[in-house]
């Protein structure tokens, strides 16, 4: 079903400080919310505006981006409804910003990946953390779909939350078929989470992507 209310957002900057900055759309994991994810703000580029968006579906004391048929396996109609909702919001919110980039963790990585696959031209870069792309959900995945797009993929190889087949499929496609300018980083001992070294690397990656596009 379509969503009509505007997203709930925790912003890293007050309205008068947002114009003329890069916008980063940050998508939390399943069962979390925008407030908990906004704790990352001090570790992300301070010259950017980060929009920590709340997912639309209540789940487990938090929120989810889509209904699924198992971990990392979105239902096509549910993922599409959320993507339409977010793109509609971005049609307004992106105005005045120099670019729009994505940052997604776990279920938020699947959602960010869905947005990126659907409309890669809308985004300057993407940071994908500890998750999978949304396979078999009706999205384009042809060879070269992300040609030249800066993409950061961070994870711990010992993370067992996301099914191994989905992680393998994601890695193979990103490396061999996507055409993206991929930076792949591994963080032993991090588990299914986000570490300070990963945030430092992701921040440096975003700054480099923005400078390269300038």
Image (cartoon, rainbow, N blue to C red):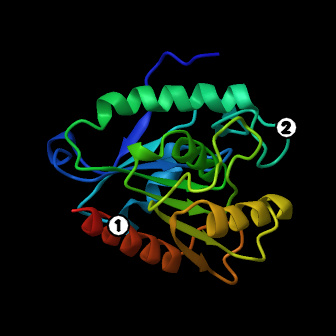
The answer to whether residue 193 is seen in the rendering is: no
Residue at image coords 25%, 68%:
211
- Provide the secondary structure element on which disc 2 rests: loop
Residue 20 at x, y percent in the picture: 16, 49
Task: Kindly indicate the quadrant of the structure image that contains residue 189.
Answer: bottom right
Q: Is residue 205 above or below residue 10?
A: below
Q: Nearer the viewer, residue 207 or 116?
A: 116
The residue positioned farthest toward the front in the image shown: 143
Residue 57 at x, y percent in the picture: 65, 30
- Provide the secondary structure element on which disc 1 rests: helix
The answer to whether residue 182 is seen in the rendering is: yes
Residue at image coords 52%, 47%:
116
Q: Nearer the viewer, residue 166 or 158?
A: 166
Q: Going by the image, does 175 lie left or right of 151?
A: right
Q: How crowded is mark 1: few (under 14 residues within 10 Å), some or many (20 or more)?
A: some
Q: Mark 2 points at which residue?
A: 69
Q: Residue 74 carries which label?
A: none
Q: Nearer the viewer, residue 48 or 149?
A: 149
Task: Kindly indicate the quadrant of the structure image that contains residue 161.
Answer: bottom right
Q: Name the residue under label 1.
A: 209
Q: Quarter of the image for the C terminus: give it.
A: bottom left
Residue 133 at x, y percent in the picture: 67, 52
The residue positioned farthest toward the bottom in the image shown: 188
Q: How far apart are marks 1 and 2 (CA)?
A: 34 Å
Front disc: 1 or 2: 1
Q: Going by the image, does 91 lie left or right of 19?
A: right
Q: Quarter of the image for the N terminus: give it.
A: top right
Total marks placed: 2
Q: Going by the image, does 2 lie left or right of 100?
A: right
Residue at image coords 33%, 72%:
208
Residue at image coords 21%, 46%:
18
Q: Is residue 113 above or below residue 181?
A: above
């Amino acid at each position: 079903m379509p969503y009509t209310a505007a997203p709930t957002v925790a912003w890293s900057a007050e309205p008068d400080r947002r114009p003329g900055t890069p916008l980063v759309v940050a998508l939390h994991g399943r069962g979390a919310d925008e407030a908990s994810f906004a704790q990352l703000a001090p570790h992300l580029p301070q010259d950017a505006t980060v929009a920590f968006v709340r997912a639309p579906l209540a789940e487990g004391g938090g929120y989810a981006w889509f209904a699924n048929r198992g971990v990392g396996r979105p239902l096509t109609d549910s993922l599409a409804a959320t993507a339409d909702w977010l793109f509609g919001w971005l049609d307004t919110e992106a105005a005045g910003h120099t670019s729009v980039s994505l940052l997604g963790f776990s279920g938020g990585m699947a959602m960010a990946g869905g947005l990126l696959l659907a409309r890669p031209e809308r985004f300057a870069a993407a940071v994908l953390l500890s998750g999978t792309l949304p396979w078999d959900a009706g999205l384009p995945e042809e060879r070269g779909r992300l040609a030249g797009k800066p993409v950061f993929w961070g994870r711990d190889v010992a993370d067992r939350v996301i099914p191994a087949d989905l992680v393998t499929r994601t890695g193979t496609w990103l490396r061999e078929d996507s055409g993206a300018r991929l930076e792949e980083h591994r963080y032993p001992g991090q588990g299914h989470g986000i570490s300070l070294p990963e945030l430092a690397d992701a921040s440096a990656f975003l700054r480099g992507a923005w400078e390269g596009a300038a």
